[in-house]
């Protein structure tokens, strides 16, 4: 950016700054959304609740299935036995 361009667009600096901040917030939100650690912690907590008798086996199964589906979604496609992509059929 040249000196003249910088001076002429100086009034737009706050708008560019807000845009940059919004980009950073969106990037961090996406990173947190795709992080499997909270789902893994919830699975561990769920198992502790089952072992402590605070939830039923049916409730555990239902919630575990939901969490495992979410974890699978986060981790992406699974690989086959020898490291290649999994195949149907």
Image: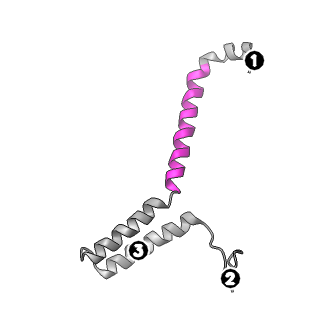
* Real-space CA distance between mark 3 and mark 2, rounded to the nearest whole angstrom: 25 Å
- 10 Å crowding of disc 3: few (<14), some (14-19), many (20+): some
Which span of residues is magenta-colored? 12-34
Residue drawn at point x = 51 percent, y = 57 percent: 35
At mark 1, the secondary structure is loop
Disc 1 to disc 3: CB gap under 8 Å: no
- Which label number is shown at residue 2? 1
Q: Is residue 19 left or right of residue 43?
A: right
Tell me which corner region of the image, top left, top right, bottom left or bottom right, holds residue 7. top right
Q: Is residue 12 above or below residue 42?
A: above
Q: Earlier in the sequence, mark 3 or mark 2?
A: 3
Residue 29's x, y, as percent? 50, 48
Secondary structure character of the magenta stretch overall: helix
47 falls in the magenta region:
no
Q: Measuring 55% from the left and 66% from the top, which residue is drawn there?
A: 73
Mark 1 vs mark 3: which is more N-terminal? 1
**Quarter occupied by the N terminus:** top right
State left or right for residue 46 relative to residue 20: left
Tell me, for residue 64, which label it has, or none. Answer: 3
Q: Residue furthest front?
A: 82
Q: Residues within 10 Å of mark 2 (few under 14, many from 20)?
A: few
Q: CA distance from mark 1 to mark 3?
A: 57 Å
Q: Are marks 2 and 1 in contact (CB under 8 Å)?
A: no
Along the line of sight, the residue nearer the viewer: 61 or 83:
83
Give the residue at mark 2: 88
Q: Pinpoint residue 39: horizontal percent, then vertical percent.
A: 44, 63
From the viewer's perspective, is residue 72 above or below residue 36? below
């Amino acid at each position: 950016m040249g000196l003249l361009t910088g001076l002429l667009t100086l009034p737009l600096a706050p708008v560019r700054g807000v845009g940059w901040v919004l980009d950073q917030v969106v990037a961090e939100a996406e990173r947190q959304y795709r992080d499997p650690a909270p789902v893994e912690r919830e699975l561990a907590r769920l198992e502790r609740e089952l072992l402590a008798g605070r939830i039923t086996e049916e409730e555990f199964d239902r919630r575990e299935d939901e969490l495992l589906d979410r974890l699978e979604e986060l981790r992406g496609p699974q690989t086959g036995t020898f490291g290649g992509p999994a195949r149907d059929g």
